[in-house]
Image (spheres, rainbow, N blue to C red):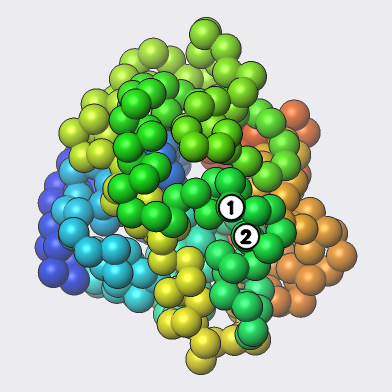
Amino acid sequence: MEGIEHTRVEVNGINMHVAVKGQGPVVLFLHGFPELWYSWRHQILALSHKGYRCVAPDLRGFGDTDAPASVDSYNCVHVVSDLVALIQSLQVEKVFLVGHDWGAIIGWYLCLFRPELVKAYVCLSVPFFRRNPIVPTVDSMRALYGDDYYICRFQEEGKVEAEMAQVGAEYAIKNMLTNRRTGPPIFPKGEYGTAFNPDMKEDLPSWLTQQDLAYFVSKFEKTGFTGGLNYYRNFNKNWELTAPWSGAKIKVPVKFIAGELDSVYTSLGMKDYIESGGFKEDVPGLEEVIIQPGVAHFNNQETPHDITNHIYNFITKF
């Protein structure tokens, strides 16, 4: 794809696949689930032409990066350790950070654990999670939405993988990427079924080509979904590991962007958390909040030019 270089870097005991393009200050892109480096294809091309070195790894467990077998290998300490080693391999002191979905969550952990490595952070979709000092993360989600809330359904090893195998990788990925339903995703009992998107249409939206979908499908048919699902299985482990940072503030400069139809923004009290000032209280470095009208969860792909411009206009300030 237009001069993108693909390399493998040894980081933290694994081999990580990294897509790189451009010269200049580093912009490190972190993807979510069910995604890959490819989710940032538009931003990589655009920002590399504007004088930035764009670096987009497949996170551990995804795509062409190694996928350790144990669930515990996907906790926040291991994943952030991968990124610290990757940044060190680039021989730079700091990076501009951009994260979406799980990449956004990992981005918050990187800002929490190693803020000196981040010049500024553009976060898409998932705001900072204020740590509840008493109730583990998944326990609180289950109390709020029940056992069929998607994150609760993802907890048992092998079960949702078997359900996804029944519908196939293409259906599962298309079902997630094209979802525009607001509120908490609640799965049908006992099956993957219509999962995230009961309103899924046969035709793809204009922003997702058949070639794009085929790329994602080809990689997940090869790897399966377990690596990505193991991130969800570490929500409670991450809650334990971050106890020393309970109440800590994020002081890195931050710009937050979400679609108004995003199922994250419209559940778990996130909208109220953002609008009430709780988000700014926890993230004193928060400089801008952008809510995109009519846009859903995968905003880096649905509105690529808009997201690229938001990133560029923010990072040029530093």
Which residue sits furthest front? 190
Residue 28 in the image: x percent, y percent? 39, 56
Q: Residue at x 69, y 67 (%)?
A: 286
Number of numbered tags placed on the structure image: 2
Residue indicated by mark 1? 147
Q: Residue at x 53, y 20 (%)?
A: 207
Upstream in sequence: badge 2 or badge 1: 2
Q: What residue sits right under mark 2 in the picture?
A: 142
Q: Secondary structure at mark 1?
A: loop
The three-letter amino acid code for the residue at tag 1 is: Asp
Residue contact between numbered discs 2 and 1, judged by CB atoms under 8 Å: yes
Q: Residue at x 83, y 69 (%)?
A: 277
* Callout 2 crowding tier (Cα within 10 Å): few <14, some 14–19, many ≥20: some
- Single out the residue that lies furthest toward the right: 276
Residue 218 placement: quadrant: top left
> Percent from the top left, x then y, of residue 145?
68, 53
Q: Is residue 148 left or right of residue 165?
A: right
Nearest the viewer among 38 and 222 is: 222
Residue 210 seen in the current view: yes
